[in-house]
Image (cartoon, rainbow, N blue to C red):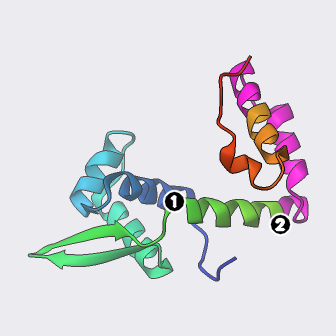
Amino acid sequence: MTDRPGLSKAETEVARILWEKGSASVREIHESLVAQRAIEFKTVQTYLRRLESKGYIRAKLVGRVRIYSPRIKPATVIRETVADLVDRLFGGKMLPLMRHLIEDGDISPGEIEELRAVIARLDLPKGAANSAKPGPTK
């Protein structure tokens, strides 16, 4: 885990746009968000300042425009967020979370087959996982 503060829902939404774009100005981020929902330009600026102060993004001045880019990869944020969730809600145990997601989630038969394939790969002896090639599922 890290000492980095977690992200709010809105901050995550802004970070996701930066992960997709690679880098963007406030205006570009605002345009992406406003296509999804009504949001003020100054609100987007506030979210960006928060993300920067929390260490998730960086900004550089290009001419007179601040360009923002991610400092943290999405996989890192996902790993940290899930670890925090598992610690807080499930006492650090992963299986209850997985059981909840499988039993209470809207999982399609195709997704269940994908889960079986993942579990089968994890059951392979060490070294065999690299040589196993995923094939079509029945």
Identify which residue, 83 or 64, lies in the foreground: 83
* Amino acid tagged 1: Pro
Q: Quadrant of the C terminus?
A: top right
User: Does 101 sit left or right of 34 as displayed?
Assistant: right
- Asked if residue 105 lies in the magenta stretch, the reply is yes
- The relative height of residue 43 versus residue 32 in the rendered view (above or below) is below
x and y, in percent, of residue 48 in the image: 38, 69
Q: Nearer the viewer, mark 1 or mark 2?
A: 1
Q: Quadrant of residue 52?
A: bottom left
Residue depicted at 66% across the width and 22% down the height: 136
Q: Residue at x 47, y 53 (%)?
A: 13
Query: Which residue lies under the disc numbered 1?
Result: 74
Of all residues, the one furthest to the left in this rendering is 63
**In magenta stretch: residue 34:** no
Q: Is residue 48 left or right of residue 25?
A: right
Q: CA distance from mark 1 to mark 2?
A: 20 Å
| Structural crowding at the residue carrying mark 1, measured as other residues with C-alpha within 10 Å and reported as few (<14), some (14–19) or many (≥20) | some
Task: Answer left or right for 66 relative to 93.
Answer: left
1 or 2: tag closer to the N-terminus: 1
- Compared with 16, 67 (above or below) is below
Residue 29 image point, x, y percent? 30, 55
User: Magenta part of the protein: which range?
Assistant: 87-114
Q: Residues within 10 Å of mark 2 (few under 14, many from 20)?
A: few
In depth, the one of 23 and 132 nearer the eye is: 132
Which type of secondary structure does the marked residue at label 1 adopt? helix
Q: Is residue 104 above or below residue 121?
A: above
Counting from the top left corner in percent of width and height, residue 135 is at: 65, 27
For the stretch drawn in magenta, the main secondary structure is helix
Q: Secondary structure at mark 2?
A: helix
Q: Is residue 52 above or below residue 113?
A: below
